[in-house]
Amino acid sequence: MKGITGCYLARNQYALLIILLIISCVTDKHTVHFENIFEPVLVIGDTSNVNKQFKCPVVEGKFGWPQVRVDSTGRIYILDRIFFTIDEYNIKGEHLNHINLVKGKGPGEVIHPVSFAIDDSGGIYVMDNTQMKINKYHKGKYLDSFKYLKRSFNMSYIPGYGLILLNVGPINRSGNIPNTLFQVVNLQNKEINGLGVPMPSADEWGGYSFLIKNDTIWAVSGGGYEVGEYIDFRLVKVFKGDRDCVPPKYIERGGKTAVAWPAPSGIGSVFVNEDYLFVTTYGEVGNNLDILNRETGRVKTSFENFTGLFEAYDNENNVYISYGSYIAVGKIRF
């Protein structure tokens, strides 16, 4: 009887070991931490609520809702969309310049600064989404402003093109978007061309964020998990995710249908390297980061509860990630 019992226990222990190994394999992609593949070289902002130690310089600062850009010389610019400020740093974390944006409707003033861009000469362009205008500043001084076509939440400066904006509409009650729009601003004559292009999901929520690298554009669908790859503004490839995303809520505002995003700060951002596509999304379980193979389009690994947004990169292959209260600069080793 003891032999039978011992054999029974041994078999069950063996079966339990197999089950544990299977569970480990299935959940392995969620047990790896992003910190294991990201090597920060600089952190700027408030890290008092961050439960980790950084092995790099940390420059203390306070941000309400930051967006980060970097110019061709490696200088770092941070727009705070809550406090109406722009601060400039070098890669060592040394503070170089500070601009206070004036809230209002007059020349050089802004009401809703949602995005900004830096040109090759150090000119700073701030997008005011309420007045639908772009203000230009240089060395802290206001120079000029001009209108753009349709509301947008993101823009970048691209040599040879000027400014490129991506709008998020039109969005109707059913969520139908026949196409979205890249707005290309010629900085020489202020001419604006609107290019209607299809988003990956024509029946989803339009474009929210985009990345331009080596003359290729990767645009993230607004609330969902699809990324379109564009060459010369032509859609050439679509990357699809495998998770459910939270759709936008539609509300009535002033007799018109408006969109209330579940979490605007965590919807859609993208970064690419030679082999992989890094996409942040807002899903049922919170903010997530998925890494896709650029050749196959398949998800290789995922990170749940990832709260960062990929916002810029530089010539040294550093990626700039906004975590809300701080900005982290570093390299992804994957």
Image (cartoon, rainbow, N blue to C red):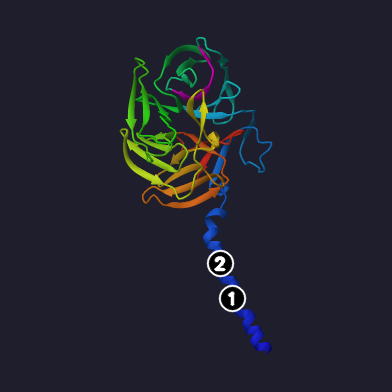
Range drawn in magenta: 108-118
Tell me the number on the disc at residue 45.
none
Please say whether residue 252 is visible from this viewpoint: yes
Quadrant where the N terminus is found in the figure: bottom right
Q: Position of residue 310 (x, y in %)?
A: 50, 37
Q: Amino acid at mark 2?
A: Leu
Question: How many neighbours does mark 1 have within 10 angstroms: few (below 14), some (14-19), or many (20 or more)?
Answer: few
Q: Position of residue 87 (x, y in %)?
A: 57, 23
Give the residue at x 62% y 33%. 325
Circle 2: element type: helix
Position of residue 5 in the picture relative to residue 328 (left or right): right
Give the residue at x 43% y 27%. 156
CA gap, disc 1 and disc 2: 11 Å
Magenta stretch: includes residue 113:
yes
Position of residue 100 in the picture relative to residue 206 (left or right): right
Q: Position of residue 73 (x, y in %)?
A: 46, 27
Q: Residue furthest top?
A: 106
Q: Amino acid at mark 1?
A: Tyr
Determine contact: label 1, label 2, CB under 8 Å. no
Give the residue at x 65% y 88%. 3
The residue where tag 2 is placed is 21
Work out whether residue 54 or residue 178 is closer to the camera in this orientation and state it. Answer: 178
The residue where tag 1 is placed is 14
Work out whether residue 17 or residue 89 is closer to the camera in this orientation and state it. Answer: 17
Position of residue 134 in the picture relative to residue 236 (left or right): right
Work out whether residue 101 or residue 98 is closer to the camera in this orientation and state it. Answer: 101
Circle 1: element type: helix
Q: To which quarter of the image does residue 235 belong?
A: top left
